Amino acid sequence: MDNPFAPELLIEERGPVRLVTLNRPEALNATNEALHHALVRVWRHLAEDPGARAVVLTGAGRAFSAGGDLQHFVELWDDRELRRAEIDGARRLLNEMVDFPLPVVAAVNGAAVGLGCNLAVCSDIVLLAESAFMSDPHVGVGLTAADGGAPTWPLLMGMLRAKEYLLTSERIPAHQAVSLGLANRVVPDAELLDEALKVAGKLAAQPPQAVQSTKRALNMHIKRAVAGVLEYALGEEFASFDTPEHQQLVRSFLERSKARTAAAGRPS
């Protein structure tokens, strides 16, 4: 099938199911500008596919998505026009996923961090590999938790738990994510994709009008919860990029990463 989003985002036909794969495995599927742009636009593309009835969303390699690319954050510090486009894209992505008519099964095959975590929880059914974990570390890198965590997590897990995990950026192991309400169930790593395709096949076999209208009705709860919160949080996230705390945290992380890479490359 036609795929205008390659190579960052792959789309495969599996009968009436479309398998969508984030495809930056060398970067743990962290979202650079190209991948973020593809994720915003892919939902309307899939909605216009007459043969599609359900979608499986997963990541290539050993991660679902490590969230935002920190090197890309540096580009956003001085390029405010690009930053505004990113913030607008974050708004569109959340709204596109909530409004997307077909059921989406997230097959979370590894780390689901930041935007990656929120891609998962904005899906309709979330399956986690046993080795997977979730985290929204926006606050930990000095950013407002805007594009998913603050607007949606209280609806999924309750306000007090959402505050704990968003304000501390704590990692959430797979079984804990299920108990909190961020995922449906845990699946052995080797069985994850097959199980996700099986679940998506069941959804695809249901009467499409009934499935799509019921999803739309359920997502009205999310749309009402998100209204207002998203705009405030995104505005604050835009401002967060200018704070010295955020910039120092990112610089420190990148310096440690560079040192680890250099050490790994030295002969023993």
Image (cartoon, rainbow, N blue to C red):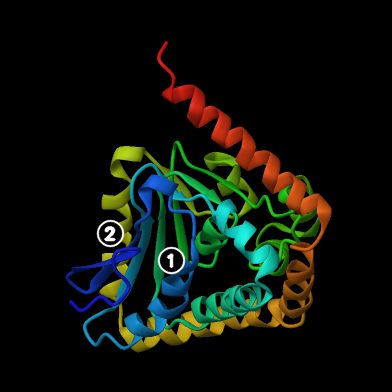
Task: Answer left or right for 95 relative to 159.
Answer: left
Q: Residue at x 59, y 52 (%)?
A: 70
Q: Which residue is mark 2?
A: 197
Front one among 26 and 126: 26
Q: Residue at x 56, y 60 (%)?
A: 115
- Disc 1 to disc 2: CB gap under 8 Å: no
Q: How many marks?
A: 2
Could you say which quadrant of the image residue 197 lies in? bottom left
Label 1, residues with CA under 10 Å away: few <14, some 14-19, many ≥20: many
Q: Which residue is mark 1?
A: 35
Disc nearer the start of the sequence (1/2)? 1
Could you say which quadrant of the image residue 34 lies in? bottom left
Task: Answer left or right for 149 relative to 99.
Answer: right
Could you say which quadrant of the image residue 226 lies in? bottom right
Q: Residue at x 74, y 58 (%)?
A: 143
Q: Position of residue 173 (x, y in %)?
A: 57, 39
Front one among 158 and 72: 72
Q: Amino acid at mark 1?
A: Leu
Q: Position of residue 94 (x, y in %)?
A: 57, 75
- Name the element at disc 1: helix
Front one among 27 and 13: 27
Whether residue 182 is visible: yes
- Name the element at disc 2: helix
Quadrant containing the C terminus in the rendered view: top left
Quadrant containing the N terminus in the rendered view: bottom left
Q: Position of residue 183 (x, y in %)?
A: 53, 54
Whether residue 68 is visible: no
Q: Amino acid at mark 2?
A: Leu
Mark 1 or 2, which is nearer the eye? 1
Task: Answer left or right for 4 relative to 35.
Answer: left
